[in-house]
Image (cartoon, rainbow, N blue to C red):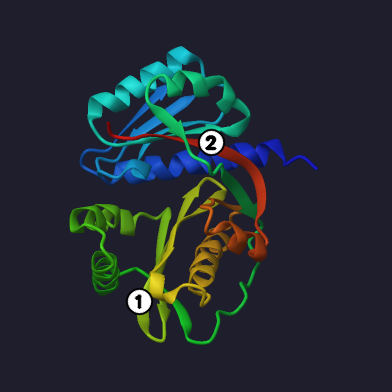
């Protein structure tokens, strides 16, 4: 059965909206619109935090304007194109130094349950909602190797306090080892930035962090919760009950 087109469009809007939300809380953040394309720059020098999304068929002129706009801003970036339309733009992007990722990133959705399943023993999740919990999350991220300016940019105070954002830290035996973010756009919520420190993986931490973000969507009254899955997270999300809506081809341009 084909996914509901309205739900696919809502998932696309949430994906784009998550980047728009992050740009709102960054001093160098900006958004550009080029026909069916939305481009965004957070000002954080990480490729997956800058780029453009094409959820429909994008003309070469639109793609060229978006890439020029991104190049002018000087940050590394990625391009996400709905897989049904990627083949038509792949030669154009290849000629400009972009390479398609092997992994086609799935957009997935779930209807949030009233009560998520209990976490495994030793695993707990708490909301990041005050200065102490923000500092704890930052210390975990920086200690794991994230450059401090990027960590502080991603978890800026205004972003943490945004009413359409909920951030969570996951714990294993009392130690902070993971995180997740929920971002609301209208009546759809998205799960983002699910991560677990390497030494704590395969213990149910990422699953618990994801369920916490799903529960935030339920508390907001959202009818659906969506996410875009990494290759590592995909089997976890399938086991949780997420279903695939569509996929994005991801294009990177490597230095040199």
Q: Is disc 1 placed on a helix, strand or loop?
A: strand
Residue 91 in picture, x, y percent from top left: 50, 20
Q: Is disc 2 placed on a helix, strand or loop?
A: strand
* Residue situated in front as seen by the camera: 41 or 204: 204
Q: Sequence order check: which comes first, mark 2 or mark 1?
A: 1
The answer to whether residue 105 is left or right of residue 50 is right
Against 59, is 249 above or below?
A: below
* Residue situated in front as seen by the camera: 168 or 86: 86
Identify the residue position indicated by label 1 in the image: 176
Residue 7 in picture, x, y percent from top left: 65, 42
Tell me which corner region of the image, top left, top right, bottom left or bottom right, holds residue 173. bottom left
Identify the residue position indicated by label 2 in the image: 249
What residue is rendered at 59% in x and 80% in y? 118
In this view, the residue farthest toward the top is: 61
Residue 8 in picture, x, y percent from top left: 63, 39
Against 93, is 210 above or below?
A: below
* Residue situated in front as seen by the camera: 10 or 101: 101
What residue is rendered at 24% in x and 24% in y? 72
Viewport quadrant of the C terminus: top left
- Determine if residue 223 is in view: no
What residue is rendered at 24% in x and 29% in y? 73
Residue 49 in picture, x, y percent from top left: 35, 43
Against 168, is 161 above or below?
A: above
Real-space CA distance between mark 2 and mark 1, rounded to the nearest whole angstrom: 33 Å
Viewport quadrant of the N terminus: top right
- Determine if residue 247 is in view: yes
What residue is rendered at 60% in x and 40% in y? 247
Q: How many labels were placed on the picture?
A: 2
The answer to whether residue 5 is left or right of residue 20 is right
For marks 2 and 1, give the one nearer the viewer: 2
């Amino acid at each position: 059965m084909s996914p509901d087109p309205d739900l696919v469009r809502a998932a696309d809007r949430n994906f784009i909206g998550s980047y728009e939300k992050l740009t709102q809380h960054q001093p160098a953040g900006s958004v550009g619109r080029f026909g069916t394309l939305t481009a965004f720059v957070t000002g954080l020098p990480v490729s997956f935090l800058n780029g453009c999304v094409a959820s429909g068929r994008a003309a070469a002129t639109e793609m060229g304007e978006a890439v020029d706009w991104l190049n002018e801003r000087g940050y590394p970036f990625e391009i996400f194109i709905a897989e049904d339309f990627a083949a038509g733009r792949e030669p154009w992007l290849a000629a400009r130094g972009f390479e398609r990722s092997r992994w086609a990133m799935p957009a997935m959705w779930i209807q949030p349950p009233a009560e998520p399943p209990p976490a495994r023993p030793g695993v707990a999740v708490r909301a990041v909602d005050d200065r102490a919990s923000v500092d704890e999350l930052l210390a975990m991220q920086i200690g794991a190797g994230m450059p401090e300016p990027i960590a502080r940019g991603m978890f800026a105070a205004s972003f943490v306090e945004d009413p359409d954002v909920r951030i969570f830290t996951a714990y294993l035996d009392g130690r902070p080892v993971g995180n997740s973010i929920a971002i609301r756009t209208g009546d759809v919520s998205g799960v983002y930035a699910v991560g677990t420190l390497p030494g704590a993986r395969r213990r149910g931490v990422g699953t618990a962090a994801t369920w916490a973000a799903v529960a935030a969507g339920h508390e907001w009254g959202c009818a659906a919760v969506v996410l875009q899955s990494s290759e590592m997270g995909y089997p976890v999300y399938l086991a949780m009950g997420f279903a695939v809506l569509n996929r994005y081809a991801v294009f990177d341009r490597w230095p040199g």
